Image: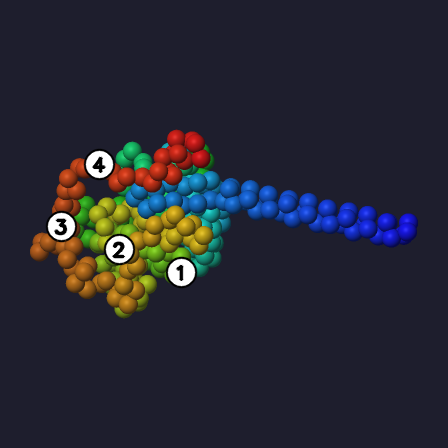
Amino acid sequence: MIFSRFITLSLLTLLAGALALAAAAGRSRAASSASATQSIGAYTAGCIRNSAAIPMEGEGFQVIRPGRGRYFANPETIEFIVDLGKRVNENANGIILIGDVAQQTGGPMLDEHSSHQTGLDADILYWQHPIALQRSLTGQERENIFPQSVLNDQRTGVDDFKWDERIGKIVKTAASYADVDRIFVNPFVKRKLCSEYPGELWLAKLRPWYGHDGHFHVRLKCPAGNVSCVPQEPINTHDTGCGSDLASWFTSSGKIKSQKSSGGGTRPKLPDECIAIINGGA
């Protein structure tokens, strides 16, 4: 009888222990889910829950102008930056300087950016800064580095004196990532790369857009599990975009056509979830 009661008590103890472990695991999963980063909404109308800070530097990359507070991202973006930096350092003997990515909560920026709201957009300078190639930048140096245009003074093409042969290798490497959805570049930069890499299909990811003559703008796809992230329409990856589409950007005199006015309307409406996040309530 005593032995039987002992076995029963032991089984009950084991069962209680198993239930406690299961409950703890459930709480752990719930906590993990609650703290997981989420990119929410569209690239031009969204936010980030539980963003992560990009390291100020690593192999092949350094963050510039951190005082602007725009070095927050989805972890997928950080993983991309870290890996791209390594590949640029190893394969091109170059460096990537990381400009604007997103604010800590994402959301709209009160300047020229309409995107950079979900932590999935990153500006990367073309400039192979001679000091950054040799050592870590000081805090003051970081704050005073700005994009340098690769166009000529007449803005009728890329200036070969300003163009570094590593730029093409770096942009091509960035475009090679499956998670990269598209890369915005100046139309003249796209034309330059179309001539350097004729017929190569990664060029399809390069989307001509105004500005972008001092940096290229990488946009990542919505990460798996980010259920509230709104993707863009997929691009045609079977067409380099180096033909009539690119030609349509230029006037007969060889300059880029003027940008049509957007009407100066209001910004797109943010998801309700983002209002709470940006206001510090979620």
Q: In the rendered structure, are the residues bearing label 2 and label 3 in contact, judged by CB atoms less than 8 Å apart?
A: no
| Mark 1 secondary-structure assignment | loop
First in sequence, mark 4 or 2: give its number.
2
Disc 2 residue type (three-letter): Arg
Residue at mark 4: 266
Q: Earlier in the sequence, mark 1 or mark 4?
A: 1
Residue at far right of view: 2
Q: Nearer the viewer, residue 110 or 30?
A: 30
Q: Could you tell which of marks 1 and 3 lies nearer the N-terminus?
A: 1
Q: Position of residue 11 (x, y in %)?
A: 78, 51
Instruction: Determine the residue positioned at 35% across, 38% down.
Output: 272
Residue 30 appears left or right of 249 = right
Residue type pointed to by label 3: Lys
Q: Are marks 3 and 4 in contact (CB under 8 Å)?
A: no
Q: Residues within 10 Å of mark 4 (few under 14, many from 20)?
A: few
Q: Is residue 122 left or right of residue 76?
A: left
Is 4 placed left or right of 261 in the picture? Answer: right
Q: Are marks 2 and 1 in contact (CB under 8 Å)?
A: no
Label number found at residue 207: 2
Residue type at mark 1?
Ala
Judging by the rendered image, the residue that carries numbered circle 3 is: 257
Q: For the residue labelled by badge 4, is the local secondary structure a helix, a strand or a loop? A: loop
| Real-space Cα separation, disc 1 to disc 4, in angstroms | 34 Å
In the image, is residue 149 above or below residue 239? above
Badge 1: few (under 14), some or many (20 or more) residues near its Cα, within 10 Å? few
**Residue 166 seen in render:** no
SS of the residue under disc 2 = strand
Ranked by sequence position, the earlier of labels 2 and 1 is 1
Q: CA distance from mark 1 to mark 3?
A: 32 Å
Of mark 2 and mark 3, the one earlier in the sequence is 2
Q: Residues within 10 Å of mark 3 (few under 14, many from 20)?
A: few
